[in-house]
Amino acid sequence: MQQLLPLKPDPVVTHGDFSLDNVLIGGGEVVGCIDVGRVGIGDRYQDIAILWNSLGEFGSSLQERLFEQYGIADPERGKLQFHLMLDELF
């Protein structure tokens, strides 16, 4: 974990567990989210990594579309890996 620690933090308000299980969709749009017990200030990749991992169940094209829609041309793979490993501790 120490070796993967992201060197450049990007603090934002994060959900903390932003998986598909915690997203409410209505009419083809996100209308809310539940389970906000881990909400707080954190690196944006905390939520991106968890959602990216959830989308992997449906294929890599959805994972890549997440980055496109979010405006991330070159995802930080080290941050993805770090936050996925960190999430395993919860």
Image (cartoon, rainbow, N blue to C red):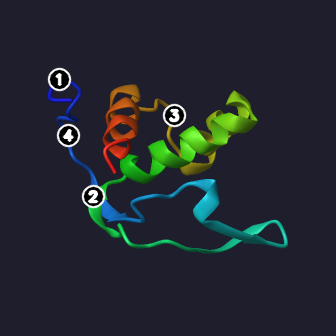
Q: Secondary structure at mark 2?
A: strand
Residue 32 percent across, percent down from the top left: 62, 76
Would you name the residue on which mark 2 appears?
Answer: 42
- Going from the N terminus, do you reach mark 1 or mark 2 first? 1
* Crowding at mark 2 (Cα within 10 Å: few <14, some 14-19, many 20+): some
Front of the two marks 1 and 4:
1
Residue 3 percent across, percent down from the top left: 17, 23
Q: Tags 1 and 3 in contact by the CB under 8 Å rule?
A: no
| Picture layout, residue 75 above or below residue 67 | above
- Going from the N terminus, do you reach mark 2 or mark 4 first? 4
Q: Tags 4 and 3 in contact by the CB under 8 Å rule?
A: no
- Between the residue at mark 2 and the residue at mark 3, the CA separation in whole angstroms equals 21 Å
Amino acid type shown at disc 1: Gln
Q: Secondary structure at mark 3?
A: loop
| Picture layout, residue 66 above or below residue 2 | below
* Residue under the image location 63 percent in, 59 percent down: 21
* Residue under the image location 45 percent in, 58 percent down: 17
Residue 42 percent across, percent down from the top left: 27, 58
Using residue 8 as the reference point, say whether residue 36 is left or right of it.
right
Front of the two marks 1 and 3:
1
Amino acid type shown at disc 4: Lys
Amino acid type shown at disc 3: Ala
Q: Quadrant of residue 59?
A: top right
Residue 73's tag is: 3
Would you name the residue on which mark 1 appears?
Answer: 3
- Going from the N terminus, do you reach mark 1 or mark 4 first? 1
Residue 8's tag is: 4
Front of the two marks 2 and 4:
2
